[in-house]
Image (cartoon, helix red, strand yellow):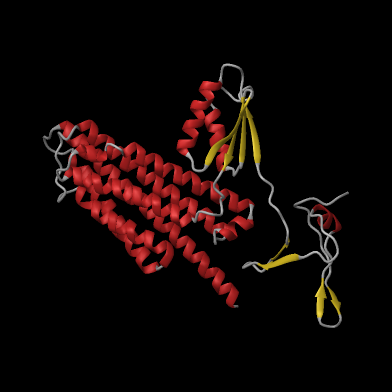
Amino acid sequence: MAKQAGDKDVRKLQLTGGATYTLSLPKDWIKSHGLESRDGVQIDWRPSGALRLTPLDTVEDAKRITLSTTNIPEGALLDHLMGAYLSGTDRIIIRYLEGEERAIKRVIRTFQRSTRGFEIEDEGMNKITLIALINAGELPMRSSLNQMFMQLNSLMRDILEVFAGEQIELIEDYDEREREIDSLRFLIERQAGIALDSYKVAERLNLGRRQAVEYANLARSLERMADHAQQMAILIIEDKGQTKLSIESAPLNQIPIWQEAIRTLMINIRTKDPVEIESARISLKTAQDYLGKHERGLWSGRKNANKVLFEDHISESIRRLCAYSRDFGETLLNMLTHEMMITERMQE
């Protein structure tokens, strides 16, 4: 019976010429890769101590999937497109019934706004083909994280300026900024998934596979922060500036503390200073406790209910920003600890 991926085999080392150890390779593996005598095989020594063997001329197969509206529940095409995108598909073929073209194209436009790099390659009779134009290994994941942070930080800065007296129009594009952050998060999750399947993509990204997964965790934390920034913008716009809050008092006086902490954490994706990371997390925890206490005190005494409710929601969102930023810092510490462990193992 032919061996398959996942099967295990034990082979003994042989000493050749008194100085070189040799190991025979499984014949099925040789055949499956189309190798012959004298072909090159790359050997990588992994941090875990394992050896990885790869044919030098390996060409990665393009991933493709076909989606048919006859096999997908009504209204679920977008979910299936997003699933294909996150799974690392390079080409998506959509087949549909007569009369569905307009609705299908509307879903495709929504999909393209929510993702990065997919364009229509071909349109045929009741068929549309989408193809990925961005190679997963080309755009550094840290760059995408930085773009997410800049969008989030700019929205929070504008929110603070609106409370300080600027026009509400300054934050009316919150939905566009949120969509940009979401698309970057999806891109990072797509890259992380592809890196898990392909070590070559991980190498091009200059990341280990574990690091790629942790980058996806960082992206999720930033995306959750952006959700609360968006909620704050919606509250302010719906309130039409009627409720006044001082930027010098709670809860708004904690926004600069959050800004400084998340900026420090973003820098430490590169610098990896455990003291700075922990210091930022401590300041965020202090801000969380301060805001929690502030929220509990809002409902005491006679106050305007609308103002109290507005302020409570704003305070809760800022507190959640701090909480997700602490999660962000915890992920950084996990990454740092893992790197230290690998370095120590290599030095033994």
Residue 345 makes an appearance in the image: yes
Q: For residue 209, what is the image quadrant?
A: bottom right
Q: In this view, does 254 lie to the left or right of 134?
A: left
User: Nearest the camera: 328 or 91?
Assistant: 91
Q: Residue at x 59, y 43 (%)?
A: 87
Instruction: Spot the residue most to the top.
Output: 99
Residue 251 makes an appearance in the image: no
Q: Which residue is drawn at 18% across and 31% down?
A: 306
Instruction: Spot the residue most to the right.
Output: 1
Q: Which residue is drawn at 42% across and 61% down?
A: 269
Q: Where is residue 161 in the image (x, y as percent from the top left)?
A: 20, 46
Q: Tell me: residue 169, above or below residue 200.
A: above
Q: In this view, does 243 lie to the left or right of 210?
A: left
Instruction: Spot the residue most to the left.
Output: 302
Q: Tell me: residue 64, above or below residue 72.
A: below
User: Nearest the camera: 56 or 243?
Assistant: 56
User: Nearest the camera: 240 or 125?
Assistant: 125
Q: Where is residue 315 in the image (x, y as percent from the top left)?
A: 24, 43
Q: Position of residue 75 (x, y in %)?
A: 52, 24
User: Nearest the camera: 206 or 127?
Assistant: 127
Instruction: Spot the residue most to the bottom.
Output: 18
Q: Which quadrant is home to the C terminus?
A: bottom right
